[in-house]
Structure formats: C-alpha cells, structure tokens
Image (cartoon, grey):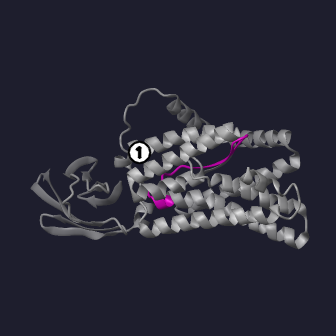
Amino acid sequence: MQLLRIECLGKELRLEAAMSGWQGLFWDGHLVSQINASADALPLQRHSFTLQSSQGTIECHLDVDLEWQPFLLQYTLTVNETPISEGQITTKDIEKQEVIDRPPEKTKFSFIGLGSFALKMLKSAKAIKVLFAAGSLAAYSWLFSIEFALALIACLVFHEYGHIRAMKYFGMKTKGIYLIPFIGGLALSESKINTRWQDVFIAIMGPFFGLLLSIISLIIYWVTDIELFAGIASFNALLNLFNLLPVLPLDGGHILKSVAFSMNSVFGLIVCVLGALLGIAACYYFGFALLGFILFIGTFEILFEWRDRHRSQLLPLDRYGQTVSALWYVVTVGLLCSIIYILGTTGNNALAIPMTILGA
C-alpha cells in the first residue's frame, strides 16, 4: 500500500509497504530500495540509494519509523548527510492521498472481466441514469403500483445518497446515483479509496441514511397517523437490513471484509467465504434466486481479495476502527430490526409483512 509521497531532488519519492514487513522505495517511478519481510524486522528502517548527477554521486537516505496499530509513520530524508525533509503521516493523511496505480497485469479472457468492461462503458454515459430511473419506475409500477414504485425509488435514492455524502466527506469525486431495475441502486465514484475505514464508512452510510429515513417516517406516522409513512418506515427498514447482510457485494459484506481482513487475512477469508456459502444455501432453500446470484458473484470478490492481499493498497483498520465499525454495524442492524418489530406488532397485516419475511 502507498504510505508516503514527497519530493526528492525534483522528482517524486514514493514509499510502499505491506503489513508483512515489506517496504519498497520508488524515485521517479523506479525502485531504488527494498526491504524484504522478516520476522526480525524493526519499526525503524533505513532506505539508502545513490543518484548520479553532473556534480557527482548523491547519497540519499530515508529513515522510516513505522507503526501499524495505531498507524503512524515518521520519516527523515537526508541528501549528502543534510536533512531536507521530515515529518509524520497519519491515517488522515493516507485518506487524502491519490493512489498511484501499478501497471496492470495481463490476464486471460473472462466473462467477469467482460462484464466489468461493459459496466464501465455504461457508467460513462450520462443518459443511462435517466434510462435506468425510468426503467426502475416502470418495472416497480408493473409489479406493484405507481405509489409503491415512487416510495421505493425515494428510499433507494435516500440510501444511495448516504453513500454519496460519505464519498464527498473524503473529498472523492462522484458520478452520481444509478437506479437498476429489479436490482436496486448504485452510487459511483471516480476516485479510489485508500483505507479500510473509507470502505466501511462509505458502505455503512447508505443503510445509516436509510435508518434515519425510517425513524423520520415513523415519527411522522405517530404524529399524523397516516399509514403511508408507517409503510415507508417498515419496508425501508427491511430494504436497508437486506443491504446489511454480511455477504459481498452488499454493504454488510464490505463492512465484514474490511473488519475481518484488518484482523487477519486467513481469518478474513474464512469468515467471508463461510458467510457467502451460508447465504447461497439459504437462497436455495427459500428460492431467492436473485440473492443467490448476488452472493455467488460476491464469492469471487472474496477470492480476488485473498489473491491480491499482499498487494493491497488499503490501509487496514486499527483496533479502534475495528471496534467502532463493529458497534456501528450492530447498532444499525438492531435499530432497523426494532422498527420492523414495532410496526409489525400493531395488528396491521400489511405492516407485518417485513416481520413475516424475517421470520420465514
């Protein structure tokens, strides 16, 4: 993962590292120093390299004191025994960095790659937003009613807006919200994340905004006694609870992946794969073909994450981040379930549907 980018003699000096202990130092895009992973590695490391100029040989040293939990990097750059740059890098600094992509590796043809390319082509067309939104409205109106379709789309937009706000909080450029018929919504960003905390925060803010909408609708229902708002509160809670299922590529899956892989890669793989397999088995049992397909695709994302774990560009969560992420997830799930239970026990058969689904 990319940890440091500073200027050195008019060129960029970039430090990349892995939690295993590996460090690589790049000057002007060229590897000039490398420290391999070792069980005996110390937090304080020195990178040394030489550069040739018209004035002779230039001796450069980068002293790095790196702590992962909590993350803190302190550095000093010296040129010909003269310190020219020093400072420290924290998690906040990593979040603001622009990730430098590595050269893409050649891969064999795959339908997954082709699908990814097709999706990127679709995302580049602005008119596709309108087409998808119109298609979603028509599809949900055909299945249910125009009133229900409008309410459902409003819930989806509110949920995806939570993701958009989270992206903008980190200064990321966004492409907006796409409504996919029979699937839901999608919030897209032009920027890449740098840390696992960004992944968690962006993922959970969608269901969290959905929770706020359900709470507001529930309060309006209690004040006005209009059942439409009770229905919005209940079904919106179910929609966001579905998104918090701890399986990829749902929001809950991203949260689980970031927390688990920050603890231990092997542990993360086992937890995510077991969650996906249990979800697929449940889908076969209850006949939820669409959810089963989503979980099947999510299983590949887990395997890709495992395959690329040593080349991850994401700074892992520290102990505080793991605790906050887990508590935020549990509290959000608990409040959504509470709203469904409160409205499901009012004696109204329509409002009891979400609770019936959960109890199925």
| Outermost top residue | 109
Q: Does the magenta-highlighted stretch encompass residue 120?
A: no
What residue is shown at x 84% (from left), y 62% (from top)? Answer: 230
Q: Which residues are magenta?
A: 179-198
Q: Does the magenta-highlighted stretch encompass residue 181?
A: yes
- Callout 1: SS: helix
Q: Amino acid at mark 1?
A: Trp
| Outermost left residue | 56
Quarter of the image where one finds residue 339:
bottom right
Position of residue 98 relative to residue 44, above or below, is above
> Taking 40 as reference, is 226 left or right?
right
> Taking 228 as reference, is 106 left or right?
left
Residue 313 showing in the rendered view: no
Residue for badge 1: 306
Position of residue 222 relative to residue 6, above or below, is below
Q: Position of residue 217 (x, y in %)?
A: 80, 65
Q: Position of residue 130 (x, y in %)?
A: 73, 42
Position of residue 260 relative to residue 283, above or below, is below
What residue is shown at x 54% (from left), y 36% (from top)? Answer: 116
Quarter of the image where one finds residue 15:
bottom left
Residue 322 showing in the rendered view: yes
Total marks shown come to: 1
| Outermost bottom residue | 223
Q: Position of residue 348 (x, y in %)?
A: 89, 59
Mark 1 crowd level (few <14, some 14–19, many ≥20, 10 Å Cα):
some
> Taking 234 as reference, is 59 left or right?
left
What residue is shown at x 25% (from left), y 59% (from top)? Answer: 8
What residue is shown at x 21% (from left), y 57% (from top)? Answer: 39
Question: Which residue is more in the foreground, 109 or 235?
Answer: 235
